Amino acid sequence: MLERCREMLSGRDLLTTHDWTREELTAVLELAEDMQKERWSGKYFDVLKNRTFFMFFYNPSVRTRQSFECAATELGGHAQFLEPKSMRLKTAKTAGETIEDAARVMSRYAAGLGIRMLEDKVAAYGEGYKMIKEYADWADIPVSSMADDRFHPFQGLADTMGMRKHIGKDLKGKKATLVWGHGALARSWCSVQEYILMSSLYGMDVTIANPEGYDLDPEVIGWAKANCAANGQEFKVTHDQKEAYEGSNIVYSRNWMSPNAYTPDGEFLKAQEVEKALAYPQWICDEEKMKLTDNGLYIHPMPIDRGHEVTDEVASGPRSICVDVAENRLHVQKAVMAATMK
Amino acid sequence: MLERCREMLSGRDLLTTHDWTREELTAVLELAEDMQKERWSGKYFDVLKNRTFFMFFYNPSVRTRQSFECAATELGGHAQFLEPKSMRLKTAKTAGETIEDAARVMSRYAAGLGIRMLEDKVAAYGEGYKMIKEYADWADIPVSSMADDRFHPFQGLADTMGMRKHIGKDLKGKKATLVWGHGALARSWCSVQEYILMSSLYGMDVTIANPEGYDLDPEVIGWAKANCAANGQEFKVTHDQKEAYEGSNIVYSRNWMSPNAYTPDGEFLKAQEVEKALAYPQWICDEEKMKLTDNGLYIHPMPIDRGHEVTDEVASGPRSICVDVAENRLHVQKAVMAATMK
Amino acid sequence: MLERCREMLSGRDLLTTHDWTREELTAVLELAEDMQKERWSGKYFDVLKNRTFFMFFYNPSVRTRQSFECAATELGGHAQFLEPKSMRLKTAKTAGETIEDAARVMSRYAAGLGIRMLEDKVAAYGEGYKMIKEYADWADIPVSSMADDRFHPFQGLADTMGMRKHIGKDLKGKKATLVWGHGALARSWCSVQEYILMSSLYGMDVTIANPEGYDLDPEVIGWAKANCAANGQEFKVTHDQKEAYEGSNIVYSRNWMSPNAYTPDGEFLKAQEVEKALAYPQWICDEEKMKLTDNGLYIHPMPIDRGHEVTDEVASGPRSICVDVAENRLHVQKAVMAATMK
């Protein structure tokens, strides 16, 4: 299984799941499922023996750091935790060493490089993704996005692994709901955008509900729409929560920022975004709304902003698969590392 | 030896040595002694192969981080260094992700979790311990205290391992002295409280000397008293240094804060504590006082505040076992990790 | 090859290459070359199995941290990343635990210790080196300089490994040029001083060019002069760039601070140094000057301050060996760790 993945994927970058085919993504998901089953059997203990994976965090993280460092350890390698404060590197906002120089040298030391760069570290939507792409262009080793302002491919893979377990391997025709949640966080688009890319690719019927003024990236929406069309499924964006919950098999409720989060000068208006988002207290996932679903599951990439995005009752309830999905991060990351790193 | 420890202790938390029986503690000390002897023989090289231990530092640390990270490495695993600043977690003083969510996900990634949370990170004495207990209640993996405001079980074990080597395996009837030292640090109660719990449990005669106003936790004192009574030994608290030193087999001199370190509003009065403590220059362990002992050893958990808690002459002298005890931290931590983590 | 190195070097500190003989340095370079060739063959995978190397960074670093942590991982061990902020240690500018105590305990935990301490962390030139020497005096394990205000032995070894590859193993009579570059960084003397020590030791003809007021450490210059004399080679310091470039086989252009960087009170005058250095825009390595050389190579320890020290054209050009030299850091560090650590 690992051999087949390596034949398909050795040396490949992973900046968004949209860059890989469904066949490639499925191969990696199956490898991840085997890695979960064989976690302590020793089967994968030496896959990255003595190899280094660089984790480069322009933004700090909870799960991502924990799960990548564990992933490397479980494959017999080591993940180095790097922060730009000690690296004097160029970003959209600071001067320093060129990405050319940094990426070329990193390629001599490590077998792979993951980068995290969210919206508050750049001057306009999309620049985080662009910078990671610049690293990928210069590096001779596989580069992956550990979340940027547009994409979060490992979260998309972990979500799908969770749906394959709790809904079934054939997701075709199941209804996936993404609803905006109010809250105090002005969250990134990366996780929810990966979710709709993956659910649409795997043949689900996709409905997004959000208040006016909270539309996501039109290009990503276009890709998801095309996926749904190719699979003969519906794709809808609505402002009506009821419509989104009705008959759903799985509900993803999460806060995200509006497209107006940046000024033309590149300032990130976090406080203003938070104030605006807090004005929609009716946008919360609760038991009453969940009753409209077809015994739907609850999914969220964590950390959860309880009381805003979702009630405690739903988040800790028996239909919540959040902790399983968080665990999946480990397995899909191990699978991608093993498949792409030499 | 490892098998027997695992049968007794697999999956167990270690928040204070007071939660474990003397039989369990002795089993772990014997395992630690074997691990010291067999350090490079390979006998224990794969015990935690590819496993992760999370070290979660609400407070930074010198020895604790070094020794835990070495311990995991020497057992073939890896210790991740986590700080709350990048984790958006709830503490007594800040909002964020719930301990429920954090602990449940950590349990999916790692084989064990150690937490450090001292008095200056909480609003009242005992809250650090309570928060670690909350993690332990939610986590499915063994949780241990890497020092909190009340307890420091690994230090207690390391002290006892040092006494077993330098005094002998039968500590019964030996006199253990704990004396307060002046200084500029307003130090925690955790190490000294573990010391009196362990020395009283192992049958030593325990004498504590401190200035008025520096009494330790009455509940812990009560447990130590009960230990001494059960072993037919004396337990004394005095303000007279001479009485404490006379005939002692081992002297532990260290600064600690007074019970008045917190305001009712939860402020930690470090500057005020330091000023108060500096007014007792006669409270220092020196050669003259050591002459009152029965050729007594000197013990301190390090880092030592030389010139305040103890003179250079004693700290670097031939009867000082501090560096050995510091080394023991490594061995007892390896033993507890190996015994409790699956 | 490793056995021979260990016989010569087991337990040895490496504070500057000047402390080792040419025979010892050559043995380590040959081991590094073999380690490069056998990087993934498994030959050196268990050399430091389960051992810890402490990396103690008083100053942060790009390459040094990355390459040392990779080096330990590739030898089967682990490098711990330590910063003084969490260590309450004594420095020239702050009070805290003594070096005696810190070094004696570290020796119980780890198999080796590397320290980095540059000019801005000390009160006068040379004090960084002295402090590392104090650690080495107290520690029972090999101590190495990961760059200080005077020396950077691993950079010197990496430079030489690069010259052996691109010029040839016999460097005798080849012309090594070191030219000062203008720029905004007020850089350390350590890398360039190691370069002239190594190139002079290996029989090269050495020419340094810098503006008036930028002379390097007279003691180090004296050692390099003596090396050249012993090898029957020339050693020159000039203010004329043309003279330095003419007929050169390899050009090292880099900024460095002047000897007046410190006030008598121990303040480091970074802003003043930068202002002064920026007044020499003609001090830049460019294609025109490189035409004066004998098809000379370009070398720099990175990160490069492009546009000040060197033009993009030269730095990214076909004669630049910078990325190879950066990679060599990994190999020479693995070789020294394997040879000195027990």
Image (cartoon, coloured by chain):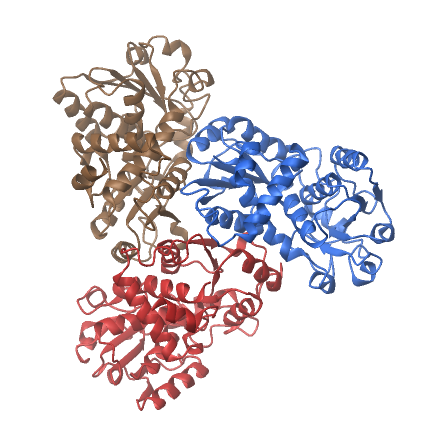
Chain colours: A red, B brown, C blue
Name the residue rendered at 35%, 71% in the picture: A28
Figure quadrant of the N terminus of chain C: top right
* Count of marks, rendered view: 0
Q: Is residue A285 visible?
A: no
Q: Where A126 falls versus B309 (above or below)?
A: below
Q: Is residue C282 visible?
A: yes
Q: Where B248 falls versus C267 (above or below)?
A: above
Residue C139 rendering spot, x and y as whole percentages: 50, 29
**Among the 4 quarters of the image, the one containing residue B180:** top left
Please name whichever residue, B248 or B50, is drawn nearer the observer in this view of the structure. Answer: B50
**Among the 4 quarters of the image, the one containing residue C154:** top right
Residue B84 rendering spot, x and y as whole percentages: 38, 51
Residue A26 rendering spot, x and y as whole percentages: 34, 75
Residue B213 rendering spot, x and y as whole percentages: 30, 24
* Side of C242 relative to C66 (left or right): right
Please name whichever residue, B153 or A47, is drawn nearer the observer in this view of the structure. Answer: A47
Please name whichever residue, C12 or C30, is drawn nearer the observer in this view of the structure. Answer: C30
Q: Where B144 falls versus B308 (above or below)?
A: below
